[in-house]
Every structure is written in structure tokens, then in C-alpha cells.
């Protein structure tokens, strides 16, 4: 009798408890799935990159050296390379678009005659690294380049008629981003790269912009008058004049986005600008607007500061936090220059500051990671190993 009573109570208890157990199980599964998905996404999207520049040509041109370099990056848990494809008005690959434009072939072929971009892409993919070619010069070209000399009608100017500015690359001229022929040329180059090579995207940096002093050429002035019924102000920093030009560059970025995605829907469109206030006010580059309009898939903000406090102030900016909520976001860190090396201690402190805020990193540039450096190669590589103890693989697009 007592046993029967116990069994009846047990059955009633189980009957009432089953819905609760089911609910707990369902919630557990959902939470587990969410955590797994979020964790996988975070791991997959964390940026650990390095720019491969013209200073790295000795490695890019030698297949054995390149294999060793890519292998070392993989062993140290890097996941992305940004090889230069557009610099000084020339491309680093055989380009039908460049030849049609009157630019003579200027290809850094490898020591075995290999196509450099095809080679670095294949070798990086073999090691599981993502490859995003870098259009370093953007709308900028040296005054002595064939591009500037053969197409003076493509160039814009300041209000006083002068056409040059001084940059880190020396004296340069600027292609007019408002001119349809210029937009077509840049778009054709970008589309050519993403279709000709098995790359995972393209990247523009702070030169996909225009210094605010420019835009006083006849074409742009006439367009501004047509749309606003007034002449451009003499003050190049006039808010409405800055906004109008920045909006035009944004519209161009939207067209570039559509052209790339039409050929390769999963291509990563990456930008690596300066901090927003500088980029927008001084270079008409509204990259925060690009992020908000879903025109870019990855953001790396260049913060080349030797002082840690100044570095942290920059990476704490609200626009970086906003972008971080939408797309993979990282910080560009200076690893050193040939005549201005950077200590591994500075690199580590800045990288850890970025990591503490959930930000990825990209280093400028490959040779200065451990070859052109203050410390020994082994010490530098150990320093990077300490920063990236576990892999953070990104999925190359297929």
C-alpha cells in the first residue's frame, strides 16, 4: 500500500515536472547554440593582420622566402595579409585596365617570373590565411607618374589652381573622385583584381579620400553650382562644402561596393582610415557613414602613436565602438619603419590595449615585424607568440 502511494506521488511529480524540464532543456540548448555561434563568430572574425608593402618586395619576389614568411605568420597565429596592389599610380600585377589607360606595364614579377599577387594568394590560402589586396594609393598619384602625366584632365586642384600636396609619399596629385572617368578607372581596377585572383576582398586606406583643399577644378565647380545654385565657398573647410564633397565620395563607395559584390558577393570590402574627426574634416572621408550604410565589411583604424596614453585615447573613440557593433574592427599598429624601429614592448602594450577592448590588430608592415627591428628575430617572434597564443582563424571565401 505504501509502495503504491509512493509510485502515485512520483508519477504526479514527474507529470508536473516534465514541462519544466523540457523548458530548461530547450533554453539550455538555445543558450549553448548562441554561445557557440557567438564564440565561433568572434574567433573567426578577429583580425590579426599585416600589410605587405613595397618594402617587402624582396620577400614577395622570392617564392622560398615568401613560403617561409607565410608559414611563420601562420605559426604565430596571424590570419590575414594585405599585399599591396596599387601604389604610385601603378599596379603590381598584369593589368589590362592599366594598359588601356595608357600606363605601361610596371609589374614586379617574381624571381621565377611568377605573378606576385597570384603567388601570395595561393601560398597564404594554403596556410589558411585570408588575402585582401590593398589599394594603397587610392586616389593619390605622384606628379611624375604616367597616370598623372597622361591624364591631366583626371586631376583636381586647389582654389589657387595648384594641384599638388605633400604626403608621406612625397609630392602627389589627386585624381578627381567626382569625375565619372576616374570612378570608372578605379572601379575597373578593383573589379579586375577580385575577378582575376582568388582573393578574399579588397582594402582601401586613408588615401581613398581627398584633402579638403581640393575640388576647385572646373568639373567639380560646375557640378556644385548645378546642384546647389551657388559657387563653392572660398573657405575649403566650410561645413556645407565639406559635406557635399564627402557625400559624393560616399556615393562613389556605394557604387564600388555594388560592382565588387556583383562579381564576388562574399568579398570583404575593408577600409583602414585615420581616426574619424581627422578623416572627415581634413580628407572628406566619411568612413563612419560608410559603416552605417553597410558599404564596408571590415574596419582597421590607423593609430600610429608612440605614446600609450594617446594610443588608448584614440582606440576609445565612440565611432570605433559603434563600428565594432556592426563589423570586424581592428587597430592599425606601427611595427616600425626602416629608420624608425619600434620596440616589441611598445607593440605588445598597444596590442594588448586593443585586445582588452575586443579589437583586432593589423601591423605596418611585414619586414618590421622581426627583420628590421631593435631586438633579435627570435625575441620579436616570441613577443608576437605571447600576444597570439591560440589560433583565430578566418574563413577564406570560396
Image (spheres, rainbow, N blue to C red):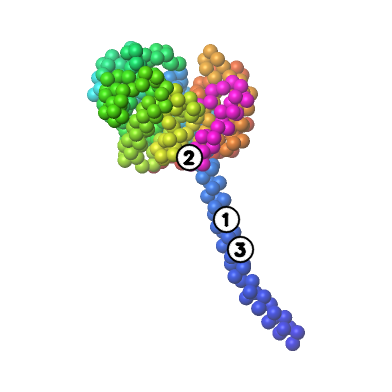
- Give the total of numbered labels: 3
Name which of mark 3 and mark 2 comes first in the sequence.
3
Quick one: quadrant of the N terminus?
Answer: bottom right
Which residue is farthest bottom? 1
Q: Residue at x 55, y 57 (%)?
A: 30
Q: Residue at x 41, y 40 (%)?
A: 294
Instruction: Determine crowd level at label 3: few under 14, some 14-19, many 20+ residues with C-alpha closer than 10 A.
Output: few
> Residue 319 colored magenta?
yes
Name which of mark 1 and mark 2 comes first in the sequence.
1
Q: Residue at x 54, y 42 (%)?
A: 43
**What mark, if any, has residue 327 been given in the picture?**
2
Q: Is residue 339 left or right of residue 265?
A: right
Q: Is residue 3 left or right of residue 270?
A: right
Task: Measure the alpha-carbon separation of dots 3 and 1.
Answer: 10 Å
Task: Measure the alpha-carbon separation of dots 3 and 2.
Answer: 33 Å
Quarter residue 107 falls in: top left
Identify the residue under disc 3: 24
Instruction: Determine crowd level at label 2: few under 14, some 14-19, many 20+ residues with C-alpha closer than 10 A.
Output: some
Residue 84 placement (x, y as % from top left):
41, 25
Instruction: Determine crowd level at label 1: few under 14, some 14-19, many 20+ residues with C-alpha closer than 10 A.
Output: few
Name which of mark 3 and mark 1 comes first in the sequence.
3
**Element on which disc 3 rests:** helix
Disc 1 and disc 2 in contact, CB within 8 angstroms: no
Identify the residue under disc 1: 31
Nearer to me, 118 or 44: 44
Residue 47 visible: no
Nearer to me, 70 or 45: 45
Residue 238 placement (x, y as % from top left):
41, 24
Task: Measure the alpha-carbon separation of dots 1 and 2.
Answer: 23 Å
Q: Which residues are magenta?
A: 302-327
Residue 225 visible: yes
**Element on which disc 2 rests:** loop
Amino acid at each position: 500500500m505504501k509502495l503504491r502511494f509512493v509510485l502515485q506521488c512520483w508519477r504526479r511529480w514527474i507529470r508536473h515536472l516534465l514541462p519544466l524540464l523540457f523548458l530548461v532543456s530547450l533554453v539550455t540548448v538555445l543558450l549553448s547554440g548562441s554561445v557557440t555561434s557567438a564564440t565561433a563568430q568572434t574567433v573567426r572574425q578577429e583580425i590579426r593582420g599585416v600589410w605587405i608593402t613595397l618594402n617587402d618586395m624582396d620577400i614577395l619576389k622570392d617564392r622560398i622566402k615568401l613560403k617561409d614568411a607565410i608559414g611563420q605568420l601562420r605559426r604565430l597565429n596571424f590570419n590575414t595579409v594585405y599585399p599591396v596592389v596599387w601604389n604610385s599610380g601603378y599596379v603590381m600585377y598584369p593589368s589590362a585596365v592599366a594598359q588601356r589607360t595608357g600606363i605601361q606595364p610596371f609589374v614586379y614579377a617574381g624571381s621565377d617570373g611568377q605573378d606576385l599577387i597570384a603567388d601570395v594568394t595561393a601560398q597564404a590560402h594554403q596556410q589558411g590565411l585570408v588575402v585582401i589586396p590593398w589599394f594603397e594609393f587610392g586616389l593619390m598619384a605622384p606628379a611624375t607618374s604616367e597616370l598623372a602625366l597622361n591624364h591631366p584632365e583626371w586631376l583636381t586642384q586647389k582654389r589657387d589652381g595648384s594641384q599638388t600636396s605633400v604626403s608621406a609619399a612625397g609630392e602627389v596629385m589627386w585624381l578627381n573622385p567626382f569625375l565619372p572617368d576616374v570612378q570608372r578607372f578605379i572601379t575597373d581596377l578593383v573589379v579586375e583584381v577580385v575577378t582575376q585572383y582568388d582573393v578574399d576582398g579588397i582594402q582601401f586606406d586613408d588615401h581613398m579620400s581627398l584633402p579638403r583643399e581640393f575640388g576647385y577644378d572646373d568639373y567639380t565647380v560646375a557640378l556644385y553650382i548645378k546642384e546647389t545654385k551657388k559657387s563653392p565657398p572660398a573657405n575649403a573647410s566650410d561645413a556645407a562644402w565639406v559635406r557635399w564633397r564627402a557625400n559624393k565620395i560616399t556615393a562613389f563607395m556605394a557604387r564600388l561596393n555594388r560592382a565588387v559584390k556583383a562579381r564576388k558577393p562574399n568579398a570583404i570590402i575593408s577600409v583602414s582610415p585615420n581616426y574619424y574627426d581627422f578623416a572627415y574634416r581634413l580628407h572628406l572621408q566619411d568612413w563612419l557613414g560608410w559603416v552605417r550604410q553597410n558599404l564596408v565589411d571590415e574596419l582597421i583604424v590607423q593609430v600610429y602613436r608612440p605614446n600609450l596614453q594617446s594610443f588608448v585615447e584614440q582606440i576609445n573613440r565612440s565611432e570605433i565602438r559603434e563600428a565594432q557593433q556592426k563589423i570586424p574592427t581592428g587597430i592599425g599598429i606601427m611595427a616600425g619603419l626602416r629608420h624608425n624601429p619600434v620596440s616589441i614592448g611598445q607593440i605588445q602594450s598597444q596590442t594588448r590595449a586593443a585586445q582588452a577592448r575586443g579589437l583586432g590588430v593589423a601591423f605596418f608592415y611585414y619586414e618590421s615585424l622581426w627583420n628590421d627591428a631593435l631586438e633579435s628575430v627570435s625575441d620579436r617572434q616570441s613577443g608576437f607568440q605571447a600576444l597570439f597564443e591560440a589560433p583565430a582563424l578566418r574563413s577564406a571565401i570560396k
